[in-house]
Amino acid sequence: MVSRSLSYCAKNSLKSRNVLIVGAGIAGPTLAYFLQRFGAHPVVLERAPQLRTTGQTIDVRDAGREVVRRMDIDRTIRQRSTKEEGVAIVDSAGRTRAAFGVESFGGQGFVAEIEILRGELVNILYERTRDHVEYIFGDHPLSINDHEDHVQVTFASGNIRKFDMVIGADGMRSKTRRLVFEDKSPIHHLNMYIAYFTIPYSQSDGTWSRWYNAPGGRSVVIRPDNQGTTRALLSFREAHRSYEDLDIDQQKQLLQNVFADAGFETPRVLSGLKNADDFYFEALGQVKLDQWSRGRVALLGDAGYCASPISGMGTTLAFIGAYILAGEMSRHQNHTEAFRQYEALMRPYVIKAQKILPGSTRIAAPQTRTGIALRNTLLGLVAKPAVTGLITKLTQSKTVEKVTLPDYENILAQQ
């Protein structure tokens, strides 16, 4: 596939250009793949000493599936998927109140057709790019100075390098964004905290996710994986800020206190939390910026337009954004025009992905037992095949507006 792409590299504006990509998660390596394929020399910089392979189950939806197909990794992703069969909404006794299989809502429901552990996907992307892309681990930018004809980056290691462009793909709390975009924080908090970690598998976990709500806006989700363990998710509604700044031991103790009387299988989850070595805790939020670029520096994925886990669109946005950004950079010699076109194509989709229904967090995590019971009853009705079928037809009529990916290979071949 790479050799096929090299036939038109000489015709596009990326030939021999050096591009620094900050972040080796999902968006960064995807961008690196297409940049290299279109003739550039990408360098991926990761602050961690090795790949960050922890994380929960994520999915790929809509046009994101077409991007992975064009990367020729769709079969690999399916082979390494969790094989999760659906999600069951349960009560404190573990009884199912509503159930949505993977096929519900045309495979675009609570559990999508393609569900894969984040770490598995990160490894797949690294395996796909490592032979043709320079990776630097255990380092990060201290300063990013944009000159008219290049960008000079000073690394924490003391190294200083020049690049034609720099792309920040380093997450919702992007260091790249803080260095280059001097505005106030663009993070819009959703007043909810969430924690992810792995616990031992139990026979009760089966092959379905189980979602339990406790009064006080608390949620416990248990998801079996394809590695013989189970992924746990704890979330709670809270307007107070700064819990994300606590150290790991303090965050674990906070969760022990918040969920002490939650019921269901929460004691088992809290027991597993004590020894979890892949613990991750964050305050949910969305990133909203008026512009995703400054000079020769642009933002990609969560760094520029995080939609939050509530949207279920973060991974999909990363894939689509990376593909479009690489394509537009290859089409336009002028970086300003490339970034402008990238934003023009992506922003409508981002706006749609970031639209969260008013009260979504209250629906996902009701405060009272009565609210939980009413919500579960409603979901039980929605889960009926006739209802899910009707909703699928209504929503599919609207998804015609989704992103249609440009065919950059043909575009470049014709230039």
Image (cartoon, rainbow, N blue to C red):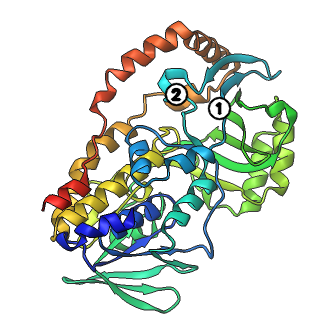
Q: Position of residue 97 (x, y in %)?
A: 70, 15
Compared across the picture, whether 66 is left or right of 337 comes to right
Assess disc 1: are there few (<14), some (14-19) or many (≥20) residues with their C-alpha within 10 Å of its C-alpha: many
Query: Which residue is drawn at the image coordinates 79% and 46% (left, top)?
Result: 229
On the image, the x and y values in percent for residue 276 come to 79, 56
Q: What amino acid is at disc 1? A: Gly
Location of residue 36 by image quarter: bottom left
Relative to 107, say whether 285 is above or below.
Answer: below
- Left or right: where does residue 225 sit relative to residue 403? right
**Alpha carbons under labels 1 and 2: distance apart:** 22 Å
Give the amino acid type for the residue marked by disc 2 in the picture. Answer: Gly
Callout in the foreground (1, 2) = 2
- If the image is split into quadrants, where does the C terminus sit? bottom left
Q: Is residue 83 above or below residue 286?
A: above
Residue designated by label 1: 217
Circle nearer the N terminus (1, 2): 2
Judge whether residue 182 can be spotted in this image: no
> Mark 2 — residue?
109
> Considering the numbered disc 2 on the image, is that residue within a helix, a strand or a loop?
loop
Query: Residue drawn at (58%, 32%), measured in percent from left and top?
Result: 111
Total numbered labels = 2
117 or 211, which is in the foreground?
A: 117
**Relative side of 165 to 27, left or right:** left
Residue 383 percent location from the top left of the image: 58, 14
Q: Secondary structure at mark 1?
A: loop
Few, some or many residues within 10 Å of mark 2 (<14, 14–19, 20+): some
Quadrant into which the N terminus falls: bottom left
Residue at 50% across / 74% down in the picture?
A: 131
- Answer whether residue 81 is visible to the viewer in this image: yes
Q: Which disc number belongs to residue 113?
A: none
Q: Is residue 330 left or right of residue 234?
A: left
